Amino acid sequence: MPPDLLIVRTFIVQFFVLRDGEGLYLIDTGFIGGQRALHAALVKRGWDALPIRGILLTHGHLDHVRNAPALAAHHGAWIAGPEGDQEHYENRACYSGLGRVAGVAEWLGRRLLRQPSFKPERLLNEGDEIPVWGGLRVVALPGHTHGHCGYYSARHRLLFSGDLFASFGLGPQIAPAYLNQDNAEARRSIYRALELPLDGVLPCHADRTPPERQLEYLRKLARGC
């Protein structure tokens, strides 16, 4: 694991802190309890005095964006996320087919938690470059949501893969159809990710095995698609 990378683990989802010089950048922001977990992880690493300057979102689902508006306001940080998920940031996402199950859950969760809508300062698309952590490239990995993306570090040959797949609970798995906006596209995105020159992958719903092992999981899933 690169020393300037911190994984923040919570009950159902993990997210990431990247240190770039004297500033911090988040990839996703977790769900309920995410802010407390972030603070504890930063204190433990000794990074709690460093400013959070930016937040990158892999997609607009509530368990990834729940804390983004509050953290951005508190730290004066910018938010960037995939343009294709703008409807999620605005609390108006639509689902069809089996995906309506996820749509209902999102609708209820956002209202029960009074999730504010927000507008990222930058909307991202395939190939966009983010000039942090030696450079991160936006990789479109649609299907889980229409705009779902990953962030690829060529320097570390590492992909932050969002919800492209999961590796906790019952073992490595692609998100079930009822959690995807386009299930067929989600499966195609598995192959798209593996076209990158990779040494490791970091999913957001994961066991504690290292990125190299997560990459093995992803390759195994591709063989079964």
Image: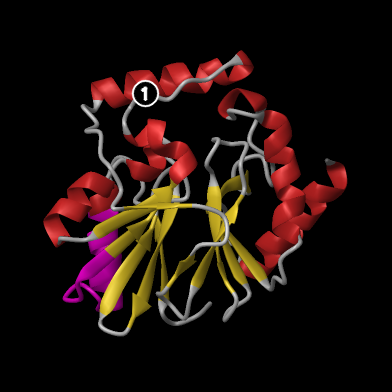
* Image position of 211 with respect to 171: above or below: below
Residue 201 sits inside the magenta stretch: no
* Image position of 185 with respect to 191: above or below: above
Task: Identify the magenta region.
Answer: 36-53
**Residue at x 25%, y 63% (from the top left corner):** 40
Instruction: Locate residue 18: give its quadrant.
Output: bottom left
117 with respect to 29 (left or right): left
* Image position of 204 with respect to 151: above or below: above
Residue 28 location in percent, x, y?
39, 53
Q: Amino acid at mark 1?
A: Arg
For disc 1, the marked residue is 92
152 with respect to 46 (left or right): right
Name the residue at the bottom extreme: 21
Instruction: Locate residue 37: give its quadrant.
Output: bottom left
Between 167 and 145, the one lying in front of the other is 145
Asked if residue 217 can be seen in this view, the reply is no
Residue 27 location in percent, x, y?
41, 59
Disc tally is 1
101 with respect to 218 (left or right): left
Quarter in which the C terminus is drawn = top right
Residue 183 location in percent, x, y?
68, 30
Tell me how the rendering is colored: secondary structure
Residue 47 location in percent, x, y?
25, 76
Badge 1 density bin: few <14, some 14–19, many ≥20, Cα 10 Å = few
**Residue at x 33%, y 67% (from the top left corner):** 25
**Residue at x 42%, y 25% (from the top left corner):** 93
Name the residue at the right extreme: 223
Asked if residue 1 can be seen in this view, the reply is yes
Q: Secondary structure at mark 1?
A: loop
* Image position of 107 with respect to 46: above or below: above
Between 178 and 152, the one lying in front of the other is 152
